[in-house]
Amino acid sequence: MGNVAHPRPTWRIVRAAIYLIIALAPLLAAPPARAQADGPIYTVAVDGVISRYTVGYLRRALRDAEAAQATALVIRLGSEGAVLRDVRGLAADVAAAKVPVVVYVAPGGTDAGAAGAWLLSAAHLAAMAPGTSFGVSSPLAEPTGAVSPQVRDLFLAEVTRQLGTWNRDRGRSDAWVDRAAREGAVFTNEQAVGLNPPAIDIVARDEQDLLTSLEGRAVTLEDGSQVVLRTLGRGSRPLEPSLWEQLLLLLSDPTIAFLLLVMAGIAIYAEFATPTVGILAGIGSVLLISSLIGLLALPVNWLSFLGILIAFGLVAADLFVPSHGAMTVVGLVVLIISAFTLFDSAQAPGVAVAFWAIALVSLLIAGFAAIGVYMVVRTRSRPITTGQEGLIGRLAEVRRRLAPEGMVFVDGALWRAVCDNGEAEVGEYVRIVGVYELRLTVHRPDEPQAA
């Protein structure tokens, strides 16, 4: 019998290894998920306007969270408005964070505006409280300065691509991005959840509900590593702003910056009106510098800023120019218009001086101006009480008989006088009715005066 050839064992082993590698390839390609349970859970609260000072505070919080290898950093967003150039940079930092970042729009009733649209897209996990919303009715980004329509379209296309990429990478809907970036759109938490897939990950009533909902969720960081969150039954640790950060956040509030500017103008004007050896001028300078620190963090319309200064000048000039309040009215109109347009709404949607502050300042300035004009008019209409003209109407004692000329004593001095209605004896009192070349014209009060 001939020999029968059998397949060599080596080939069977190689073929089995190839099959095994093909089967395990998907598992080998994905990095193993690691549970993130040991690090702290940090929270930061963002209220008011997001400006460069807010971004500085949040970047410091991100660095602290990464240094502590935190389980997660929760950013509670209760923003009233945002400077677009600053919030874009902050969103990029959130997307590139080395720890999971959760952006949570809360409490109920919060309108997160443009900041919500940017930060919810960049966050590893996006959460909203019931009754909240994000987005604005204007484009989510506008190029600074005058650019051509083509450049603007390229800029908006880049913004749309970036927002869409972030949402797709996190498994969220990007169907809303193009319209919101180019035209503007506002979404409530119900509308965001209703998209397919949803535009957010979680709807949570409060922070404790949020931490419960985060339990077991897997997050993929920018470097490709996966983290599984372990937050059930754990508490959070707030990262508070430093004293200097608190001061900067306060000064960058548009209403505070406007009020400081108004108070600086009042203090400097008061120094010129009633000199106080520089005390009021010093206070005014400090207030002005504080106001400028806040204004430099916001997109200011400098023409409106100049209008506020002109308004102060018009109100102050009304005290010296007999315009009977007309200049004050014009100044108040200029002040109100300038205050409403003080910030560029295209570059900072939602950033504006509060209406109550404008109304309060206008009423106070109008009241003080009315008092000042009244006192000036009253002073001008008051009889003269100094000099020779101030003697008219005063009573004088006769020291040398008036027949009809003689001498009278008034205001500590003797005066030559002429009686215009007869004679007066020594010791009698006569009323001064005129002064001419150091001689008084007097009238006996007991005699009826001629018409």
Image: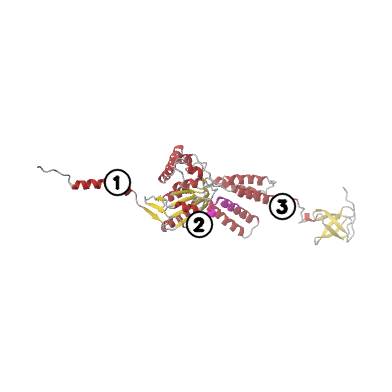
Q: Position of residue 2 (x, y in %)?
A: 10, 42
Count of marks overlaid on the render: 3
Q: Kindly tell me whether residue 188 is visible in this rendering.
A: no
Quarter of the image where the N terminus is located? top left
Amino acid under disc 3: Met
Q: Residues within 10 Å of mark 2 (few under 14, many from 20)?
A: some
Q: Residues within 10 Å of mark 3 (few under 14, many from 20)?
A: few
Q: Position of residue 104 (x, y in %)?
A: 49, 50
CB-based contact (under 8 Å), mark 3 and mark 1: no
Q: Quadrant of residue 69?
A: bottom left
**Secondary structure at numbered mark 2:** helix
Residue 418 as seen in the image, left or right of residue 181? right
| Number of residues whose C-alpha sits closer than 10 Å to that of mark 1, classed few (under 14), some (14–19) or many (20 or more) | few
Three-letter amino acid code of the residue under disc 2: Glu
Segment colored magenta: 244-262
Could you say where residue 173 lies in the image, as x and y percent from the top left?
44, 42
Q: Earlier in the sequence, mark 3 or mark 2?
A: 2
Residue 30 visible in the snapshot: yes
Q: Is residue 261 magenta?
A: yes
In the rendered image, which residue does mark 2 sit on?
245
Asked where in the image residue 156 lies, by quadrant, the reply is top left
- How many angstroms separate mark 3 from mark 2 (CA)? 45 Å
Seen as rendered, the residue at the extreme front is: 1
SS for callout 3: helix
Q: Which mark is residue 375?
A: 3
Front residue of this view, candidates 321 and 150: 150
Q: Is residue 413 above or below residue 159?
A: below
Name the mark nearer the viewer: 3 or 2.
Answer: 2
Name the residue carrying label 1. Answer: 23
